[in-house]
Image (cartoon, rainbow, N blue to C red):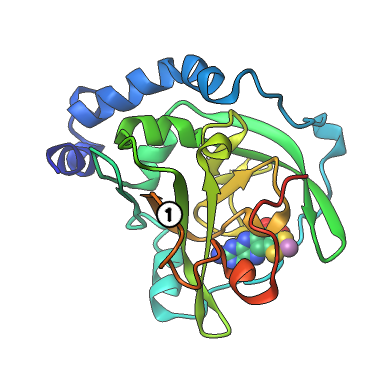
Amino acid sequence: MAGTAALLAGACSKISDTPTAQSLFRASEGWHRGAQRLLGGGGLVKEYPRSDISPFFRGNGSTAIDTPEYAAAQAAGFVDWRLEIGGLVAHPLVLSLDNIRKLPQRTQVTRHDCVEGWSAIGEWTGPQLSTILEGAQLFPDARYIVFRCADTLGGARYYESIDLDDAFHPQTIIAHMLNGAPLPVRNGAPLRLRVERQLGYKHAKYLTGIEAVASLEGIEGGKGGYWEDRAGYHWYAGI
Ligand SMILES: Nc1nc2c(c(=O)[nH]1)N[C@H]1C(S)=C(S)[C@@H](COP(=O)(O)O)O[C@H]1N2
Ligand SMILES: [Mo]
């Protein structure tokens, strides 16, 4: 909690001096080793030249959030938006967009494939999820990472989950930019997951929380995601 408070107060004080920030930065230095250990040298998905970027990256599923809270957050440039990292972690975190922008960033041009039969290529930027998770320090019994979203579809909250192999994959990032600009609302402003080895529905938009859990049982419908619970989509949606 001390680290969380310090990070939140960190906009003007020295964020890099807080214990949480120090562990975040140490973690980012060590991501290579951590990722290799977890992946056994696992490969990257194809990244494209910028010339291949689609002229328009369409939105799908929720493309807006029709609440006064979201409208106010958007009008304020999402300065009060918070991403909470909790569950089976030693150091719960509460990160602002500013905190997220100050972490080491990764930019990648990748192809998004939706099961509904369309694809688009976009350039995404944000910190690697591994940096954030290593800062939060997962307990040994953590096996899945659950993503909480601000939108509801048909009255239920959207959510998703991935295993630690995907969570620590170098191309798994918490994106705050698309094609060099802040995320458009239709694409999940202000924060969305990019988990590039997986199909479109795994890429949770409008992120508010990240939770480390031992099991997916008892979370929403128990199948690990909004569409997994409803439409029988596979939890492991590897491309
Ligand atoms: N929170 C949230 N995330 C979501 C969805 C959604 O409806 N809500 N739709 C999913 C689906 S099916 C796809 S294909 C992608 C679409 O991303 P885009 O809107 O940036 O094209 O977001 C995924 N993530
Ligand atoms: Mo999709």
Q: Is residue 205 left or right of residue 18?
A: right
Residue furthest out toward the left: 2
**Few, some or many residues within 10 Å of mark 1 (<14, 14–19, 20+):** some
The N terminus, quarter of image: top left
Residue at figure coordinates x 23%, y 38% from the top left: 90
Residue 182 appearing in the image: yes
Location of residue 228 in the rendering, given as x and y in whole percent from the top left corner = 63, 67
Q: Which residue is mark 1?
A: 215
Q: Is residue 67 above or below residue 225?
A: below
Q: Is residue 200 above or below residue 34?
A: below
Residue at figure coordinates x 59%, y 72% from the top left: 229
- What amino acid is at disc 1? Ser
Q: 150 or 36, which is in the foreground? A: 36
The C terminus, quarter of image: top right
Residue 59 appearing in the image: no
Q: 100 or 27, which is in the foreground? A: 27
Residue at figure coordinates x 50%, y 79% from the top left: 156
Residue at figure coordinates x 86%, y 34% from the top left: 51
Q: Is residue 123 left or right of residue 156?
A: right
Location of residue 129 in the rendering, given as x and y in whole percent from the top left corner = 48, 37
Q: Is residue 124 above or below residue 159?
A: above
Q: Is residue 33 left or right of residue 8?
A: right
